[in-house]
Amino acid sequence: MSGLSKAKRLVVKVGSSLLVGEDGTANGAWIADLAADIARLRARGQQVLVVSSGAVALGRRRLALPRRKLTLAEKQAAAAAGQSALMRAWEEALEPKGAVAAQVLLTRDDTETRRRWLNARATVETLLDLGVVPVVNENDTVVTEELRVGDNDRLAARVAQMIGADVLVLLSDIDGLYTADPRSNPKAEHLAQVTHLTPEIEAMAGGSNAAAGVGVGGMATKLAAARIASAAGCATVITLGSRPSPLAAIEAGARATLIAPSTSPKAAYKAWIAGALVPAGTLVVDAGAAQAVAKGKSLLAAGVRRIEGRFDKGDAVLVADETGREIARGLVRYEAADAERICGLRSAAIEGALGYTSGPMVHADDLAVVPARA
Ligand code: GLU
């Protein structure tokens, strides 16, 4: 029911309570079991990215910090000592399954500032294409309180959005969403499927129910994550992580809540390009290129007549025809000075002119076509 078996890209978020045992050390056996579960998906050709908490919990014990509430600096110190232990645990679990783990530490800026977002996205995409399992966490050691994402549910949703994942799995200590807190209310009913995140559903995760599901993120943050994912075209599955092979269990129909996406990842990405970015310049194109772009093809340098404005590689630009009509918006692959030098050149001549090539001026995947007016 979850679409898990058909997903091309999955983000699996694992909470501290699953990763770290009572004694404050990594739960090696459980992580190894999840690694086997992940290896099974990879063997089917699916790409898996892990968002892993646990740095602070592991570091606390390594640094023998007191049991009281830690100061921010202590927490950041714990994260530094714990993050390396966390990666060791993931490496020890994934390597025997033939998978290389790669540490990716992100801050909120990386998912919100466009240039950093594009850079982080390119790195993570490269890792996935190389067959690596990226293990993502927030860069707790350096990020200040105001600039934190704060919880890994939301971080995982942002990452899912960034890489156009189709399924986000939140492995939790509760098997999904309930109409009330099942631990205090015997009448609480489990919700297997949520098609729309209505205000009623949102309200269920508030109040006393907000904390159900533990860790930093209770139900409220899980729903906040699901909202981000849904708008990015990604389904969210919330389920119990403590059972053996939790991903296989989801496929076998174990109790979980599935929150449906409200769009497709591709449509969400194009909407982001079309609406959320301020264009830094314009590429004026000839009639042939205008036609090709309108049909969803990449914009080649050969069809670009001239450029306007100052932009960097990765910036949003307008694509306009020679009458000034806007045809599309897209992310340009060359900075303005280089774009200027290759205007009108055939693709094969770009390398000779610049000493490198980044392919088309704007790739079809990064182009949002403005619908033609009737
Ligand atoms: N980034 C934190 C850690 O690794 C966890 C945050 C969370 O669990 O939501 O300790």
Image (tube, helix red, strand yellow):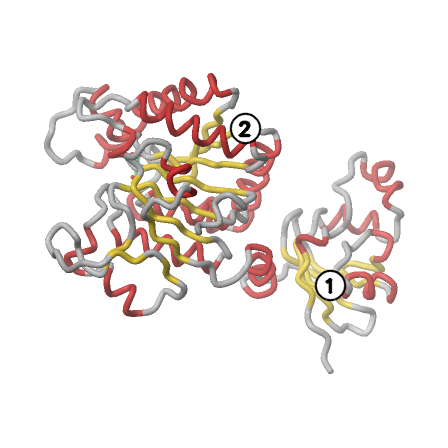
> What residue did someone put label 2 on?
132
The secondary element bearing badge 1 is classed as: strand
Residue 326 image position (x, y, % from top left) = 72, 70
Determine whether, in the image, residue 37 is placed left or right of residue 208. right
Amino acid at pointer 1: Val
Rendered-image quadrant of the C terminus: bottom right
Q: Residues within 10 Å of mark 2 (few under 14, many from 20)?
A: many
Residue 147 can be seen, yes or no: no
Depth check, front residue: 185 or 347: 185
Residue 26, position in %: x, y? 28, 23
Query: Outermost residue toward the front?
Result: 252
Q: Amino acid at mark 2?
A: Val
Which disc, if any, is residue 319?
A: 1
Report the side of 305 relative to 361 (left or right). right
Ligand number 1: quarter of image? top left
Q: Is residue 54 above or below residue 197?
A: above
Out of 28 and 110, give the one closest to the viewer: 28
What separation in Å lies between label 1 and label 2 (alpha carbons)?
A: 36 Å
Query: How far across and how far down the image is residue 293, in percent?
Result: 77, 61
Circle count:
2
Residue drawn at the location 85% of the way across and 57% of the way down:
303
Query: Who comes first in sequence, dot 1 or dot 2?
Result: 2
- Left or right: residue 340 compared with residue 65: right
Q: Is residue 96 visible?
A: yes
Residue depth check, mark 1 versus mark 2: number of the one nearer the observer: 2
Q: Is mark 1 within 8 Å of ligand 1?
A: no
Crowding at dot 1, Cα within 10 Å, few <14 / some 14-19 / many 20+, comes out as many
